[in-house]
Image (spheres, rainbow, N blue to C red):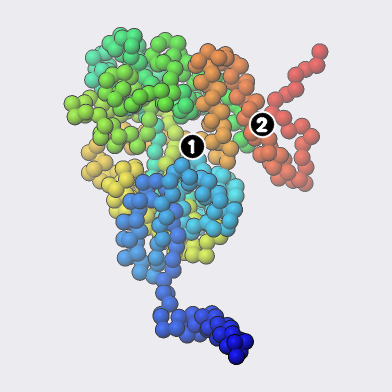
Amino acid sequence: MRRDGTSWLWSQARALAGLALICPIALGGCGEEADPRVTIDFWAMGREGEVVRELAEAFERANPDIVVRVQQIPWSAAHEKLLTAYAGDAMPDVFQLGTTWVPEFVALDAIAPLDERLAAAPEVARENFFAGIIQTNEIDGRLYGVPWYVDTRLLFYRKDILARAGHPEPPRSWQDWQDAMAAVKQVVGADADAIILPANEWAPIVILALQQGAELLQGDAECGNFSGPGFRTALAFYLAMFEKGFASPTASAQIANLYQEFASGRFSMYISGPWNLGEFARRLPAALQDAWATAPMPSPDGRYPGISLAGGASLAIHRGSEHQEAAWRLVEFLSGTPQQIRFYDLSGNLPARTAAWQDPALAGDSRAQAFFTQLQRVRPTPKIPEWEQIATAITRRVDQVVRGATTAEAALAALDAEVDGMLEKRRWLLERAQPGGAVAADQSCRPAPASS
């Protein structure tokens, strides 16, 4: 009897399991109507992932056939999580990418090209965005992302201190800049700096190099080019700020509180990005809210403003997504002018769409408008997956010179050699891509020294 009872229970369990598999297909969910809507996964980073939920809800109201599942990813974990998702074939349909990450994910073949979609969508035409920012999403002539928000670097400065030093207007040329820093030092004295140049920030020296027309890498981004005249001239100007006492060797971690130090006059100028618009407004005392301003970067060649970095974040679609049409509708929606303005209101991130800058909140803000001016002259960093490694090497080598641990000449040679090593695999792949797949016997970047 027990054996029969067990056998009966087992047969019933198998029957129920089979019914469970059949129900969703044959019986429409056994009495529950299946959701006909398409669900797309959207990964957004940091604060953006929190505030975009409101826009996702607005999208769903306008597109009742689509459900957007937003996942907020901390910036500190975002890169690794995206790579892990790629390796595990679990990429989201739509995801946010920092502009310097685009080349890496294109190299992985993880992003769908968007040229045809843009061509069929006048509202998302290239000319609706800052040209320099669009370029960050173009790899080998194809577009892989739509700019979501933008950033660049420019001068934050104490206009009251510069005015006391006889410079009521921000500097427009390198010579004006040096003159202003020298005058500020006369006002603030030996215990304060005219400018802060943190040793762990690579952006300032790269900006100066781009202003000199430096091509940071040679050929098809195959080898380092830091010993070239453009980067060499930029480094000389950068080092002069320390040699003349305008700046002190320091790292951000050594500054107790950046905003308190700026408020106290410990430094009067700082090269930074749009995230500090809100931070300075919140953290500086009320008495100093009219004492600081922003200005585009000075220029070495008389053309103002000087070039700065093209940055920000873009929206990309996974090449393997089964819901690319729905994913594109979300990208198109988030790129619209009303959504760009609302996203700025929610997050403080500057709109990538130029029409959104006509909104009174931005048009009437002189500090934000300095960014609008600067965004007319921006350049992307080299569009290769190895760039972030290279940027770290630049930071380290330049800091060694600033601290007197090596000479500029030795640091540039060492930087070139280090970057050449990072790009060895790239050179190998480029050689194999040549007709016939031939690989050069000598893939080195530097000519061998002549034998004696």
* Residue on which the image places disc 2: 421
Residue count near mark 2 (Cα–Cα under 10 Å), binned few <14, some 14–19, many ≥20: some
- The label on residue 380 is 1
- Decide: is 403 above or below 138: above
Quarter where residue 311 is shown: top left
**Is 430 displayed left or right of 37 in the figure?**
right
Tag 1: Cα neighbours inside 10 Å, few (<14), some, or many (≥20)?
A: some
Quadrant of the image for the C terminus? top right
Q: Looking at the image, can residue 207 be seen?
A: no
Residue 162 picture quarter: top left
Q: Give the distance between the C-alpha atoms of the residues marked 1 and 2, in whole angstroms.
A: 22 Å
**Residue at x-position 42% and y-position 55%:** 71
Relative to 201, is 327 above or below? below
Q: Residue furthest right?
A: 452
Element class at badge 2: helix
The amino acid type of the residue labelled 2 equals Gly
Q: Secondary structure at mark 1?
A: loop
Q: How many marks?
A: 2
The residue drawn where x is 31% and y is 65% is 61
- Measured from the top left, where is residue 240 in percent x and y? 45, 13
Q: Which mark is residue 216?
A: none
Position of residue 379 measured from the top left corner of the image (x, y, whole percent): 47, 35
Residue type of the residue flagged with mark 1: Pro
Q: Residue at x 44, y 43 (%)?
A: 75
Coordinates of residue 409 in the picture (x, y in percent): 59, 15
